[in-house]
Image (spheres, rainbow, N blue to C red):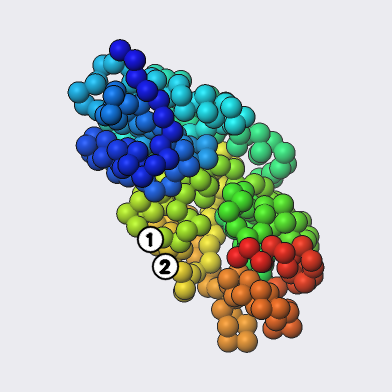
Amino acid sequence: MSYKFIECLLEHELNDAKSLLLENGLSVDDHYGTTIGIYDGNKMIATGSLYKNVIKMIAVDPSYKGKNLTDLIMTHLIQILNSRKISKYFLFTTPKSKMYFLDYNFSFIYENEDIVMLENSFEPIDEKLHRIKSKLKLKSGRTASIVMNCNPVTLGHLYLIETCAKENDQVIIFLVEEDLSIFPFKVRYQLLKAATKHLKHVHIVPSTPYIISAATFPTYFLKELTDATRIYMDLDIHIFQNFFMSIFNIDFRYVGTEPFDQTTDAYNKTMQRILKDKLIMVERLEKNDKIISASMIRKLAKEKKYDELKPYVPHATYKFLKSAKGKALLLNE
């Protein structure tokens, strides 16, 4: 019997995919870029989606089980990834389905009661993190870490880093690599490097796709606080605990308190639950009766109030925000 493959673009096709997911007891994730459907006549019998380099939302009509439709969907989605020259990719599935995909040359990263995250065999997480570690020349002693976005770098960020640096022998900053922020990774890296040049025992490395990324935390940049967001928080922090802390010999993770954003505050509370006494909370820096935040700096910069923002940012950030490149980036916010 011949089936028809389509890329779901029309509303009724996407609705067919959603209905098939719900029929299989699966949740519908709004974060997808490409959805594929297999039709038998006018009936969708299998579906699967991609979001960047993540395979997700795979479902097969129960009456078509045993007809290798999951294989067909997987092969098709991987061909799309290959055509886009994406060699590293991940897969989300349910705990009850994980064994099938482990047999499909995927390896296990993390599982909770709601979701399982797998990855393909190209440069697995242990290999990637050990490669990064080998370039750092870490010393023995108390090691702390900070995961930061720095969109852009503020004196609040610098205060957290300096506090961490005073209390530890070395600090590893995992700078969020995902380019969903206003300021691209390369810009944020350069500004952070300039701001911390006086701290010789601070290392700045990319966060990799395993921390706050399209794979581990697709809702982070949308600032949504939903059930899905809480699941991804659990996933993201457990990956940090299970892999980053052990491989880099991290003793503590530092984080600033969050008085404004409920999603970030929920993330901090999830860290407290999982990391317990390995998490160090530092009160956010206040200056001139204002709590410094990157969103405040972006707002002032967009309004070209450079004299107002100057007291709250390192010189490199101030200089960049006034530059033509900085002004152009803020037009997109």
Going by the image, does 208 lie left or right of 21?
Answer: right
- Which residue does the image show at 62% across and 82% down from the upper left? 287
How far apart, in angstroms, are the residues tagged by discs 1 and 2? 7 Å
Q: What element carries label 1?
A: loop
The answer to whether marks 1 and 2 mark residues whose Cβ atoms lie closer than 8 Å is: yes
Going by the image, does 265 lie left or right of 163?
Answer: left
Q: Which of 183 and 105 is in front in this view?
A: 183
Q: What residue occupies the far bottom of the structure in this picture?
A: 288
Q: Nearer the viewer, residue 192 or 272?
A: 192
- Which residue does the image show at 37% across and 31% down from the upper left? 37
The residue where tag 1 is placed is 225
The residue where tag 2 is placed is 262
Circle nearer the N terminus (1, 2) = 1
Task: Identify the amino acid type marked 1.
Answer: Leu
Up the image or down, 213 lies above or below 6; here it is: below
At which x and y percent is residue 118?
A: 44, 32
Task: Identify the amino acid type marked 2.
Answer: Gln
Name the quadrant of the C terminus: bottom right
Name which quarter of the figure residue 81 lies in: top right
At which x and y percent is residue 154?
A: 66, 69
At which x and y percent is residue 119?
A: 48, 31
Going by the image, does 278 lie left or right of 23?
Answer: right
Up the image or down, 101 lies above or below 167; here it is: above
Q: What residue occupies the far left of the structure in this picture?
A: 63
Q: Is mark 2 on a helix, strand or loop?
A: helix
Q: How crowded is mark 2: few (under 14 residues within 10 Å), some or many (20 or more)?
A: few
- Which residue does the image show at 56% across and 42% down from the upper left? 209
Q: Which of 241 and 151 is in front in this view?
A: 151
